[in-house]
Structure formats: structure tokens, C-alpha cells
Image (cartoon, rainbow, N blue to C red):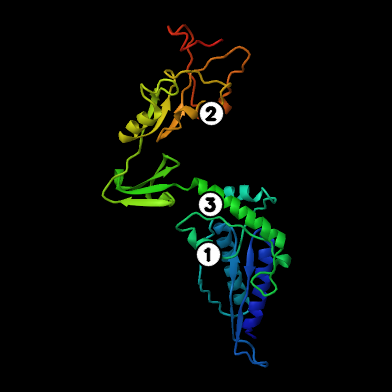
Amino acid sequence: MRRDALAAAARWTSFVERTARATPGVVATVGALHVHPGATNVVPGEARASLDVRHADDAVRRAVTTRLRCAAEKIGGRRNVAVEWRQQLDQPAVACDAGLTAMLARAVQTNAPVQRMTSGAGHDAMIVAAIAPVAMLFLRSPGGISHHPAESVHAADVDAALAAGMAFLEELSDLMPDLVIRGGRGHRQLRRAARYRSGRWHHLALGPQLPGGREELTRGDLTIFPGLIDVHLHFNEPGRVEWEGAATGSRALAAGGGTLFFDMPLNSSPCTVDAAAPSTPNAPLSSSVVDHRLWPVGRNRSGQRRPTWTSSRARGVVGFKAFLCNSGASRSFPGPTI
């Protein structure tokens, strides 16, 4: 019986092609084939073939690879040809960071429609993703030609990509912390890090989750604890800063470990926050050194709409307090019109 290794390999290669075409998203390639002894009048006794299988879902990729391996063994068995299989690489699929991808999409859509795709190629980003979040922007290659002297690109696509890149970097820069402090061991021996941006402490993370900042400080001899939250206090801005204002009060709060407070501007003058003053909530507390939200005192002036929760929440409002009866100081603390 003729034991033609090349004929078996050829039949298996055809099966690889059919399987890939029948499985959505799968790319399978037999890219190398070495035949021995390679003489024109000698039946090939050995054929070595390579196989590359790719898919965005590792489970699908591995299932297809197993099916192709079984097919090789069956084809070899029918032709009385021994089959040996050696796996050289199993590279898991790598997902781009959802936050960076959304940011990149916003940057792209200012000049061009957003097209999302799965790349089956190997990229440096796959390695970088193990230590940092990644996102990728692709330009069209006319004719689909890549890694070849004939590869080209449209000049308009380059302009759009540069504009998207600038918009992406600008938004990313706005999110970058001014200072990151990486501390020693905290509760349960977990590494902690804190982020400071635009004059306020914003985030506490465990382990290496926190990205780098414009400036970094490592203090292994210290421990970084979660900040305290004061949900009810009165910084008397505007109008009565001589009592206690946001600048001095927030510094005292920060010195005691506070990183967020909810201010109730009862002692402010005026004390009312309503739809007529959309910039009021954050302006009086702009001198604060820690993050803050508001419990404003609400009232309804004649002819005005009550503030909606959605618009107020966007301005830092977490809730409302209203005097439903005479407060005893009606000039400073007027009751609402129900």
C-alpha cells in the first residue's frame, strides 16, 4: 500500500481550509510544508506542516484546533501514515482596555465614523497589556496589503488619525494624576496607592491598579489608608467665611484623613441653591483641597422651576434639604413654596 505523507498532508490542508470557512471568526493557515526526501520520483515518506489558528475567543480557537488535530489523526490512519503533533505556542487573546477604547472612539468620531474590529494579528500591545491598559487605532491599507513593499495608506486617513490621536492624548492628559503616592503595606498586607489631581485627592487603589502620574512618590515606610468621608458639615461660603470657609475647613479635614465631604450650605449667605443659579454649587467651594458634594437648601421662587435631580446631580448635588415650616430665621433660611 502506498504511504504518501504528502497526499495525507494535502487532504488535511483542504480540511483546515473548509473548517475555517465554516466557523465564523476563525482564521486558520497552513503556511509551511516541508517534504522528505523531496525527490521527483520518490513517494514522500515525511511531510511537516505548520498550522496557525486564530480567533478572538480562546475557547473557540482551542476547540477548532482540537478538531483539526483529530482530523489529522483520522486522515493519517486511513492512509497508514503516522501523525505526530507538537504545539509550539498557545497565545491567549488579549482584550483592549474598555475605558481607553471608549476614549479613543470619542476621539475618532469627531472626524470620522467609528469602526470596531477584532485584529487577528500579533501586536506589541499584546505584551504591553500585561502591565498596562492598551487600545489600538488602525488605518486602512488599500487592497488589504500589509507588511509588504506595496503597502500604502490614504493621506486623508493619516490626517484623521493624527487628529484622533491628538484628541485622545488631550483627554488622557486631563485624566492623568498630578501626583501618585505609592505606600507601604496596608490592611491585609495589600499594597496601596493614592492619586492626587487638580488640587484634590481622587482615588485609592490596591496593588498595581493605579496608573502612573506626572509625579510619583514611593514611601514604603508609610501606610496609606482609605480617606474619611464627612457626609454632613457646614463650610460657610459664601457670606460667612470668617466663621469657617472651605479653604481652612477642608485643610483641617484633610489633616485628619478626610478626602470627601458633603457640605450643607445652611450657614451660607445666600443659603439657597436652585435652578436659577446653576453655577452656584461648585463655585463657593472651589478653594477646597479635597473633593466635595452638596446637600443644598432648596426653595422655589415665584415663576421658577424646581431644579431637576439629573441636572443638579451633574453639578455635584447629592440631595436636598428644605425647611417645611418656619425655621425661626426666615430671612436667612426661607421655607419652600409647596
Residue shown at 40% from the left, 28% from the top: 246
Regarding residue 273, the answer to whether it shows in the image is yes
Q: Label 1 vs label 3: CA separation?
A: 15 Å
Quick one: SS at disc 1?
helix
Q: Quadrant of the C terminus?
A: top right
Q: Label 2 vs label 3: CA separation?
A: 28 Å
Quick one: SS at disc 2?
helix
Amino acid beneath label 3: Asp
Task: Identify the disc placed on residue 97.
Answer: 3
Which of pointers 1 and 2 lies earlier in the amino acid sequence?
1
Q: Quadrant of the N terminus?
A: bottom right
Residue shown at 39% from the left, 48% from the top: 180
Q: Could you say where residue 297 lies in the image, as x and y percent from the top left?
A: 48, 18
Which residue is disc 1 drawn over? 124
Q: Residues within 10 Å of mark 3 (few under 14, many from 20)?
A: some
Which residue is disc 2 drawn over? 313
> Quick check: 218 left or right of 323?
left
Regarding residue 117, the answer to whether it shows in the image is no
Residue shown at 56% from the left, 77% from the top: 83
Q: Could you say where residue 328 lies in the image, as x and y percent from the top left?
A: 42, 6
Quick one: SS at disc 3?
loop
Amino acid beneath label 1: Asp
User: For residue 311, what is the image quadrant?
Assistant: top right
